[in-house]
Each structure stands twice: as structure tokens, then as C-alpha cells.
Image (spheres, rainbow, N blue to C red):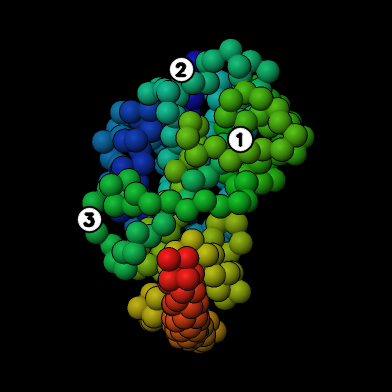
Amino acid sequence: MKVCICTIGKLENQYIKEYVEYYKKLGVDKIYIYDNNEINGELFEDVLFDYIRINYVEIINYRGYVKSQYKMMNNCYKKNYLKYDWIMFFDLDEFLYLKKYNNVKNYLNEYKFNKCKLIYLNFKYYTDSNNLYYENKSIISRFKYYKVDSRYFGKSIIRGNISKINIISCHYLTRKIKPCNGFGNFPKKFILDYKYNYIKHYSFKSTEEYCRKINKGNAVYGNSIKKKISKIKMYFKFNKITIEKINLFENKTGINLDFLKNKLYWKKRNYKQIIKYSFIFLFIIFNFFLKFLSIFKIYFRKQSLKLKWYIFYQI
């Protein structure tokens, strides 16, 4: 069995060596990296020379292309579908996790996948862990906390030897092939799996690094202001919103984020009001309790007096 990865990258020299080494240990035979940097930008060869020399990594020149991800994916599949049994389409911030397997070939060679042509695995989104700035450490060691996402987003592993395929999605690849889940089943509705087989998605990293990701643009949708703002909103859906992060986004991207500052202001104000009214509520309850206690004492005294008179008359 032979397995390869097709991926596209831009401004990823800080992280790409960790990515390549991770999948090398996982048993992937070869990685095809489509270089989408600017024409005069950084070179993947500068950090991956040793892997290129042993023919483990192949760099394909897509420098300067805009909105080129689907084109890359179709190109990579058509060139390699006869060479490999399985082809994986994972971005450079996506790490396949298999709880019971140390080698991806052992996983894909399971009998349960005999009827599968396409395996769809969900993302597990890792947060920024409240890190504002880049640290020169591995991604996996820096970000350990994740947040559950109700949407079933993920990536696919597709079989080779499928001719006449047109990839139209970076997630499902094609709607002509029914995907199976990470257990080899064909469910009517996919259920999120955060325990056994999934993709660790380090989309956010630190705030500074996410700003850099926004500025470099998207290989599918380009670099519009509207898309940048939607990316920032996505960031704060998974990560805690703070004024420091908002200011850093404004400084690094040049986008006015007053709407987020207003949101944070009202959030804090509402929080203060909740605290205020909570104290008022507790004060009312406490007074009610004291009043009840005093009534109870009066009642108890009356009852004790009655009991004393009753005993007195009995004697």
C-alpha cells in the first residue's frame, strides 16, 4: 500500500518542517507541496532541502497564483491517482490523529474500509490558549485546548484509481462519491468524533500568527476585506475576546473593529449588571430569610408559653 499527501502552502516555513516530520512518522510515503508563495517570497526549499533530496517531498511551483486550491487538488490527484492507493488532502495546519494506530497504512488497510472510496474525518479545533504572540516551539506542544464545534467540518482521504473525478470542495472533494466515516460506516448523519479518528486543526495558533494568516489571503476565496472580517469573527467564535486581541488585529490587518469593541463593552456592562442584580437579589432573599426567622421565633415563643400554661394548669 502507498499513501501520499497533497497540500498547498504560503508563508509556512515556520511550521512546515514539523508537518512533514509528523506525517513521515505516521507512515505517509510522499508529500506533494504546492508552493503558493509570492513570486519573490520565501522558499520551501530553504527548510525542506533534506526531505527533497531523499525524494520524500516534492515542491510544485504555484507561486503567485490566486484562488488556486481546487486547481491544485485536481492537478495533484490526476498526476498521482495511479501511483497511490490513498491520497490525503490536508492543509499545513491539519494533523491526522489515530488513537489505535501508529501508522496510517495499518488504519487504511483495515477490512472496514474495503467498500470505502472516500473517508471523511472531522476537525477538532484547537484554540489560541490565550497566546497573543508566536513562540519558537512546536504547534502541538503550544496549543493543547480545543473547543467543540457543532458543524461537521473536516477533510477527506480518497482512493487512487478513480478516473474522471472533478474535485469541487476542499472538504468533501466531490459529491459523486458517498463518503464513509472514520469507522468505515456510511451513516445518514455524521457524528463528531473527538476520541478515535479525527484531524487536529490548528487554524488559529496565537493572535499574531492568525493576523499573518489573514493578511496572506485564502487559497480558495482570495483576500477581500469581507473575507478578512469573517475570518476574525470566526476566530472569536472559538477564542476568548479581549481588547488586547482586538487592538492587535487592528494594528496588524488595518481593519476597523469598532463593532467588536462595542460588543466587548456591552458584554462587560451586561456582566456588571448581572453581578449588581445578583447582589440585590441575594440581599432581598437574605432579608426575607431574616423576616421569616423572626416570625418563626415569635410563633415558637407563643407556642412555648401555651405549653407552659398548659403544664401549669395540669399540675
Q: Callout 3: few (<14), some (14-19), or many (20+) C-alpha neighbours within 10 Å?
A: few
Where 177 sits versus 311, above or below? above
Identify the amino acid type marked 1.
Answer: Tyr
Q: Position of residue 41 (x, y in %)?
A: 37, 61
Instruction: Label 3, secondary structure: give it.
Output: loop
Q: Position of residue 154 (x, y in %)?
A: 57, 44
Q: Between marks 2 and 1, how big is the CA–CA gap?
A: 17 Å
Q: Is residue 178 visible?
A: yes
Q: Nearer the viewer, residue 41 or 233?
A: 233
Residue at 38% across, 28% down: 26
In the rendering, at what x and y percent does residue 51 appear?
A: 31, 34
Q: Is residue 107 above or below residue 123?
A: above
**Residue that appears at 44% across and 29% down:** 98
Q: What amino acid type is highlighted by mark number 2?
A: Asn
Mark 2 or 1 closer to N-term?
Answer: 2
Q: Position of residue 153 (x, y in %)?
A: 60, 47
Mark seen at residue 136: 3
Q: Secondary structure at mark 2?
A: helix
Q: Residue furthest front?
A: 315
Q: Dot 2 corresponds to which residue?
A: 106
- Residue 283 versus residue 38: which sits nearer the camera? 283
Point 66% across, 38% down: residue: 190
- Residue 120: assigned label: 1
Q: SS for tag 1? A: strand
